[in-house]
Image (spheres, rainbow, N blue to C red):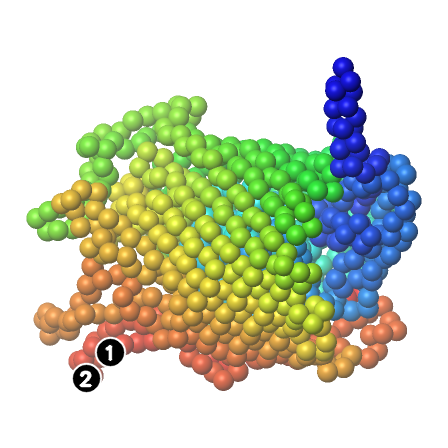
Amino acid sequence: MCNTKKLLFLLLFLTTSMYGQERYTISGTIYDNSSNETLIGVSVYFPELNSGTTTNEYGFYSITLPKGTYKVQISYLGFSTIEETINLDKKLTKSFKLKEEAESLDEIIIETNIENLNVRTPQMSVNKLTAASIKQIPVVLGEADIIKSIILLPGVTSAGEGASGFNVRGGAVDQNLILLDEAIVFNSSHLFGFFSVFNPDVIKDIRLYKGGIPAKYGGRLSSVLDIYQKEGNSKEFKVTGGIGLISSRLLVEGPIKEEKVSFLVGGRSSYAHLFLPLFDNDNTAYFYDLNTKVNYRINDRNSLYFSGYFGKDVFGVSENFVNTYGNQVANLRWNHLFSDKLFSNLSLIYSDYFYGLTLDFVGFEWDSGITNYNLKYDFNHFVSDKIKLSYGINNIYTKFNPGNIFPNRDDSGIVAEKLIDKYANEFATYLDVEHKISDKFRLQYGIRFSNFTRLGQDELNVYQNNQPVIYNSQFKVYESATPTGTENFNRSKVIASFNNFEPRISMSYVLNDNTSIKTSYNRMAQYLHLLSNTASPTPLDVWAPSGRYIKPQLLDQYAIGYFKSLKEGRYSLETEIFYKDIQNRIDYINGANLVANNEIETVILNGQAKAYGLEVLFKKNKGNLKGWLAYTLSRSEQQTLGRTTNEPGINRGEWYSTPFDKTHDFSLNASYELNKKWKFNTNFVFQTGQPTNYPVGQYEIQGLNVPVYDDNRRNADRLPAYHRLDVSATLTPKKNKNRKWQAEWVFGIYNLYGRQNAASISFRQNRETMRNEAIQTSIFGIVPSVTYNFKF
């Protein structure tokens, strides 16, 4: 009995030593003092305890600490730091309001490195941008652009000027999950890549995850671009806008009920097409979009948000050819605080991407699209200062409209045809843990379980031996099989089902206060595929679900990095090495037809892909001169083997470069503040030329020379290297200081030295010399721009 008492006493002593004393929770929300907007990623730090936390996506923080009196530092880069002394002798709810360090036209002032994540956090392969930093980067036609800005980061490239989307670490465009207020955006580009769909005036926070992706995200392999819109100023009425040479924008925000209900409405439109008739040009190309948001803070524990986006593009050649496409999203969210340690967010989300084509000279119209309905419920559980849990569920129901062709005049001769609609449901649940093991060692680990169900449709083709693609051994080519019949399913029936466990882990080890080593691993599953055999997707490319004949893509990615802050944060260095292995990568047989194909599975084979490389990011974070140097050395390859020993596979079964393979990618971005009146910005970009195919010979037929391509030599050649230099100057009038109306002029030159970068190279016969010649297509030469931005 005595020994038992001693054991109990020892356990009590160890427990008391472990926890020290009573522990209490301090929690609250952090706001921007000028607008009452919540702030994402604010640091809440207790220096005496060397402990702290950051606010979540809705500005909420929570941390549990031993009883005592401590100093707390609330800091957010670009805002003045608050330092207070608090007496933590009971549960405490305390919110803070931060003031901007200086008044400016931009929403957030960059005085230090807001993009650099804390050296100590296990999160790696992530970049954070603000609307202000994006507005400083010179871009084509003077319109600030989110997508063009992230392409300046390491590991991120594009297919070239006028190309849609972006590529991350050698991945395809469809492997990027793009979220706007949690809603999926299927096409991120206006006017085929000249602009992005995101209005920088409306944007509050942007994060690009390239690896070490948290378990809350899924459904794509390469990256997550997570974008949050502003909530609207709940203190006073504000107007922000800009007038450019070919487009303008306007943002209106203000309180409906002060500090309780706020609204935001932002719009953009291009108008260059209005001037085309002056030059006897009846072509047209324009876009417009609308962002809206309403925020209702019911009480300290409940908030409602409704946000929406609608955008549309129209491109036409006279009235004979008209292409329209666009995105629509809507999201209703409810934030609820169950306790000072448990925060929740329930979201109902609608997302639609539509694309259509009118060909009057043929006499038909085409429309297609993809629509999904998303229910998600996420929780943040702040267990202690050492452990934070994130968990939740997500269910997405998707309808695919691959195409509908119908005549638009009586004499067209076109027979109406509706391609078979497809339906699918994707369910996921996840758990993510942020764990501080010690002051030097931290972990973030979790797991995601995903289930994808291909639901019944009106008709599903059946093929002999269950193979929609056959190999013709006589001609040594792959061919589309002819269906042997069809099956019909009720909508509730399951055609195919896939389950995947997707583990994630990231860890950091701190060598000293300024240096750390990080490593990560994540597995991802992707069930939706953008079927495109061009380097840059077009609006007519089709999204298709996994099913009986198309397998889900699976990724395993490994990364290790070295992170260092230099000269008290004046400079920073981030280096990473990554390796990606992808199973079931979509590949196409030679001569694949993807447009209006009701039997799309007959041109697809499943292969594998890999990408690996080194990324270096060196940044100068303080002083009048700020900016970064980014360099990526990488390879991106894919391989499709024969299904039997008698089949050669694609490209003879050998590895070949993907269209996204860029061996060298170098970018420089710099801004220099000469004085309060003038600021100068520049960026330089160099990329290895895009993989392509050149003719290997020619033959003559009826006096014409026809180039010959080798179908078993995919992407063996390259376009010339891509490079350009952009500059801009921002003039801020001195009279801004003492009046409500604030304005600035932005003067820019895109491609300063007029580099004619090759978008493509085609081959044809010269009519005069009768010889084959190479024709280079370039999109831009030198492009000057001027934009007038204002705010009141």
Q: Identify the element where label 1 is drawn.
A: strand
Q: Comparing marks 2 and 1, which lies closer to the viewer?
A: 1
Pick out the residue farthest to the left.
Answer: 474
Q: Horizontal and vertical percent for residue 413?
A: 28, 47
Q: Horizontal and vertical percent for residue 69?
A: 90, 46
- Seen in the picture, residue 331 relative to 187 is either above or below; the reply is above
Q: Quadrant of residue 750?
A: bottom right
Q: Nearer the viewer, residue 69 or 699?
A: 69
Whether residue 324 appears in this view of the structure is: no
Q: Residue at x 59, y 36 (%)?
A: 431
Q: Residue at x 75, y 37 (%)?
A: 18
User: Which residue in the protein does label 1 denote?
Assistant: 773
Q: Identify the element where label 2 is drawn.
A: loop
The answer to whether 11 appears left or right of 670 in the picture is: right
The crowd level at tag 2 (other Cα within 10 Å; few <14, some 14-19, many 20+) is few
Q: Quadrant of residue 681?
A: bottom right
Distance in Å between CA atoms under marks 2 and 1:
10 Å
On residue 514, the disc is none
User: Which residue in the protein does label 2 denote?
Assistant: 769
Of the residues shown, which amino acid type is indicated by label 2?
Thr
Q: Nearer the viewer, residue 257 or 658?
A: 658
- Seen in the picture, residue 151 relative to 705 is either above or below; the reply is above
Tell me, yes or no, whether the two marked residues, 2 and 1, touch with CB atoms within 8 Å.
yes
